[in-house]
Amino acid sequence: MRVVVVGAGIVGVSVAWHLARAGVEVELLEAAAAPATGVTARAFGWIGLGAQAPGDDLELFALRLRAVAEHARWRRALGDRYPVSGQGALVWRGSAAETRALIDWHRARGNQVEALDRAAVAALEPGLREVPELVAWFPQDVASEPPALARAVLADAPGVVLRCAARVVALEEGVAVLADGARVEGDAVVLANGVAAEALLPGLDVSVSPAVLIEGRAEVGGSGRILCGPDFEARVGAEGRAVLAEWLPPEGEAALPALARAAEEALGRGLGTRVVLQPPQVGARPVTGDGWPMLGPVPGRPGLFLAVAHPGVILAPFLGRLAAEAVLGGASDPEMEKFRPRCRIIL
């Protein structure tokens, strides 16, 4: 069997990895000059659910909790090649009461979390200067490097043929047509190219959610674990490399310089050290209309499958396995059945 996968971000790489390990011949098409250089390169790399909060969709939370556990398969397969910048996440809100509510909410939904006081936080993260009264500690959350993770998974996918600078402009049954007129044929085609899938399937309920990533350096190195407070979401490695995740302001990209300055000041205060950040990078995250993954065969289009979702880094190993099962027509994951009604294609 031969399958064409469109999009070499973290989700497309996962689909290719699962198919290849099942003995399928896979050609992976990427519009950019290299894999994992689109929205995957602008992902913060928080593999865990410490950022989820009361009010979030409980069924979607359960799906993501299951997906996080799937990363253990990649860690076993890749070993030391699985890139971990830091282990665990420290999360706090504007008040101790809000943080306590966050802790209780996660505990009630089966996510591992501990409550730490100032002394415990100072012992765990001595570089943190503005230590809150109460912190939620998520020991199983991981700070990773999404582009490096995608490349490591791809390198572990036997026989996958990667073709870059290969922009797909049209689809026919079992065929991806490239901008240069070349036709790449397969028994199935899987679209895992995020927001670009809408151009190939007009009317697809996918919109852009801007992801802002800011990199830079702190004069004092850190643990690499995730620090998420009211003023910043960041990680600082031992060598001082700082990575921050931000929301795009309502004013748009014109407000990014001011956003970067504010982030510098906030992280510098929190760590008690000088921080210098580079210009922000903006990525286009694919968000579906109801927030649920679009996964599986596209109605009325034989041989065409879709695997589009956010957050891609968290969901990638789970969605890749399910997409491969759909393409191969095998038995579905019994645990997936409770999520299946909401993981659907909407055209």
Image: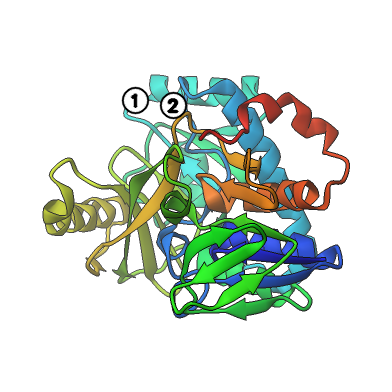
Report the residue at 30% width, 50% height from top.
Answer: 270
Report the residue at 20% width, 58% height from top.
Answer: 260
In the image, 317 versus 86, the foreground residue is 317
In the image, 91 versus 285, the foreground residue is 285
Can you see residue 241?
yes
Residue 340, image quadrant: top right
Q: Quadrant of the N terminus?
A: bottom right
The amino acid beneath tag 1 is: Ser
Which mark identifies residue 285? none
Q: Are marks 1 and 2 in contact (CB under 8 Å)?
A: yes
The relative height of residue 306 versus residue 17 in the rendered view (above or below) is above
Give the residue number, with chain letter if any, for mark 2. 99
Which mark identifies residue 95? 1
Q: Label 2's element? A: helix
Report the residue at 77% width, 78% height from top.
Answer: 159
In the image, 1 versus 67, the foreground residue is 1
In the image, 253 versus 6, the foreground residue is 6
159 left or right of 274 in image: right
The relative height of residue 255 versus residue 339 in the rendered view (above or below) is below
Report the residue at 23% width, 53% height from top.
Answer: 263
Place of residue 237 in the rendered image (x, y in percent of width and height, measured from the top left):
46, 67
Packing grade of label 2 (10 A; few <14, some 14-19, many >=20) is many
The amino acid beneath tag 2 is: Thr
